[in-house]
Amino acid sequence: MITALLAAAASCAITAAQPVDATSVAALKAAGWKSLSGSDAGTLWRGYKQRSMPAKGWTWTDGVLTHTAGAGGGDIITTDQFGDFEFVCQFRTAAKANSGIIYRLTEKHDAPWMTGPEYQVLEDEGNNLKPDHQHSAGALYDIFGPAESKKLLPAGQWNDARIRLRNGVLQHWLNGHKTVEFVCFDENGKPTPEWIAKIAASKFKGYEGFGVQPRGHVALQDHGDEVSYRNIMVRDLDAPLPGEIRLFNGKDLTGWQAFVPDLAAQGKDQASVWRVENGVLICSGTPAGYIRTTTPYTSYVLRLQWRFNPVTRQAGNSGVLLRVTGPDKVWPKSIEAQLHSGNAGDFWNIDNFTMTTDPARTKGRNTRKSKAAERPVGEWNEYEIIVNKGDVVLKVNGEEVNFAYNCEVIPGFIALQSEGSEIHFRNIRLAPLD
């Protein structure tokens, strides 16, 4: 669903299938999305190894970018380059047509595909390919075939494509269904042995630098056929959010206030449950309590990363509390975005906070996530939480897993729980929507 909403937002025409307005144009911009098919699109693309768009082959008409069959022009690339990124668009092919979206490419060889992996854009039926073939639509071309259960619409109809590369994990999506997921890089940004082996077993093994570039352009391929793209959007996941406020400075608890009642009763420092090491905020987990921002926020995009102890790899519990109001206590009135291992993305309603969730997934105060999206215990995960007026959306590692609406619209603090387990946080940042 999110890809369709992103696409609609690119043309300023949001039409949601559920009563959630958190993917409004303002929220998408705050989350870092940038349109590549707006009125200035001609300056955001250029020909491969050229300074501007090709003089033939590619045309823009009412926000739709089309390559005319046999018209030439060559591949086009974004003027910007990206490291960790997310890219969405809609594509439409003619019968038997072939194209592709190539990413993290450089201009060191004769063509983009010689350095950049490719999201395959193809009309499967006309090319007599099975849905899970390594050259079929949604595949990581010649390396990974998509899931056989993928949903591809026929030639002449618009399909949603999405590519996400974050913290070394690559994902392809087609019409809302994940088709590819693989760990390509480790935490230090080095290619994993498994990724190197996959490249070595492909047609790309002879091209120096293929698939290992830390940054690069995104390309749309001229394969000689008719293909159209629209509602093209991208976001640089490493870049600051527009108007970004870094809630954690990587050094200390400036901007945060601790509440740990057991320590307060003993006359001890309530913040001693927390420490900072190498830019990582570490919570020992005991005693129970939390730290909260000293500033309240009403509407915002919040992004943070978390993991449990990477040495012990012990599963644990914690949570992100949103719109915290009322007196400090364990636990204060708020909406909890759950971090409990295996349940990240659940909602917990604390102290009768006014909110509406999917009744099919709700039991008492808990609303279960719609899908599992966590990494193995001990690895870094990322939350993106959109709190926009009365709507709240939870995304875990780029996948939308829960939503709430009719939430009480009040300014409140953001809190991180100490709840019995060592947990680490980093890159805690916020873009206000007020």
Image (cartoon, rainbow, N blue to C red):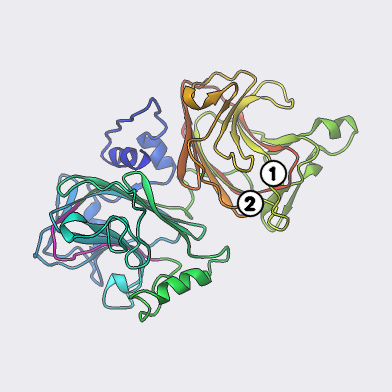
Using the image as rendered, state which of residue 17 and residue 233 is in the foreground: 17
From the image, tell me which residue sits under label 1.
316
From the image, tell me which residue sits under label 2.
377
In the rendered image, the residue lying farthest to the right is 266
Do tag 2 and tag 1 residues touch (Cβ < 8 Å)? yes
Q: Amino acid at mark 1?
A: Gly
Q: Is residue 78 visible?
A: no
Q: Is residue 211 visible?
A: yes
Number of other residues with Cα within 10 Å of mark 1, as a class: few under 14, some 14 to 19, many 20 or more:
some
Side of 37 relative to 170 (left or right): left
Q: Is residue 418 a member of the stretch shown in magenta?
A: no
Magenta stretch: give its range.
216-228
Side of 302 relative to 19 (left or right): right
Tell me which numbered mark, 2 or 1, is placed earlier along the sequence.
1
Q: Is residue 198 above or below residue 206?
A: above
Q: Amino acid at mark 2?
A: Val
